[in-house]
Image (tube, grey):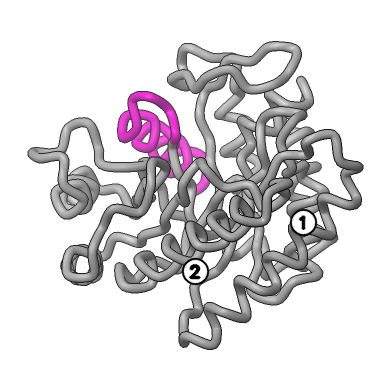
Amino acid sequence: MGELLFGPAGVPLSAKARSTEAGVERVAELGLGCMELEFVQGVKMGRETALAVGETAKRLGVALSAHGPYFINLNAAEPDKVKASQERILQTARIAHLCGARSIVFHAAFYLDTPPEMVYQQVKSQLQWIVRQLRAEGNRVWVRPEVTGKGSQFGTLEEVLRLSAEVEGVAPCVDFAHWHARTGEYNSYEGFASILRQVETTLGKRALEDMHIHVSGIAYTRSGESRHLNLRNSDFNYTDFIRALCDFGVKGLVISESPNLEEDALLLQETYRSMCQR
């Protein structure tokens, strides 16, 4: 990735139609650079649509990624649920590949009272199998487990970075709002900088030049993430966040998961341009 691109998680609210193609077209009209395809309720896009979406995105210069279904738990007790989770990740990656997307993101697992290290090893072995399967199909999409927002969910910053270091084809999706909600911290320039330093220390400077970032305002309780908010209605310190991205030379995609989608994507892009591109 040669630059830092901003865009919404899903079809912009102001798109002329609710189709993915109309969403890509609206992203381009707004002057945004990327969009995440939301398969959170299941991968319901067929091959022909995916190819058409890919053509539109390529023609308009919009970078795509995809978010896998919420119904994924690679640490499920029942083997059939693990198998179904594998298949949902594979389906997401196959359709994403047809769309020309470079990355897929997903919430990998729940701890379910299992010791975290055991969950880590289970998730690691599952992701190794999934990446092998995709590469055997000629699919080069990056598999990106997400930093999650609740203590019950597998996906601390350390776990996601460790997986990315130990499994070829795996890279992080760093959700800064989730990590703030989960820890109650990491909401200042120094907090954001410490996350980026940790990425660089664990994965090298190249990881900072191809990041996949989620951000939004967030409401949270003692157990972590409660719901997403628009940035200006939240405590998320987005100006310090942008300043840290500038100072560390971060490149890649920044996806707005705020309820207002494209409005916060534009706010972040405008803030970035005013701070970093003088």
Mark 2 lies on a secondary structure that is loop
Is 66 situated above or below 170?
above
Place of residue 224 in the rendered image (x, y in percent of width and height, measured from the top left): 70, 21
Mark 1 lies on a secondary structure that is helix
Bin the neighbour count of mark 1 within 10 Å (Cα to Cα): few under 14, some 14-19, many 20 and up.
Answer: many
Residue pushed farthest left?
16
Q: Is residue 74 magenta?
A: no
The residue indicated by pointer 2 is: 1
Residue drawn 52% across the image and 19% down it:
227
* Image: magenta residue range: 257-278
Residue 187: in sight, yes or no? Answer: no
The residue indicated by pointer 1 is: 161
Residue drawn 91% across the image and 42% down it:
115
Which is more foreground, mark 1 or mark 2? 1
Place of residue 170 in the rendered image (x, y in percent of width and height, measured from the top left): 66, 67
On screen, residue 66 versus residue 251, left or right, reads left
On screen, residue 88 versus residue 61, left or right, reads right
Question: What's the mark number on residue 121?
Answer: none
Bin the neighbour count of mark 2 within 10 Å (Cα to Cα): few under 14, some 14-19, many 20 and up.
Answer: some
Place of residue 30 in the rendered image (x, y in percent of width and height, measured from the top left): 21, 43
Q: Nearer the viewer, residue 95 or 24?
A: 95
Residue drawn 70% across the image and 28% down it:
150
Q: Is residue 269 magenta?
A: yes
Based on the displayed image, in which of its 4 quarters is residue 168 positioned? bottom right
Q: Nearer the viewer, residue 257 or 224?
A: 224
Residue 171: in sight, yes or no? Answer: yes
What amino acid is labelled 1 in the image? Leu
What amino acid is labelled 2 in the image? Met
Place of residue 195 in the rendered image (x, y in percent of width and height, measured from the top left): 76, 44
Residue drawn 50% across the image and 29% down it:
216
Dominant secondary structure (helix, strand or loop) of the stretch shown in magenta: helix
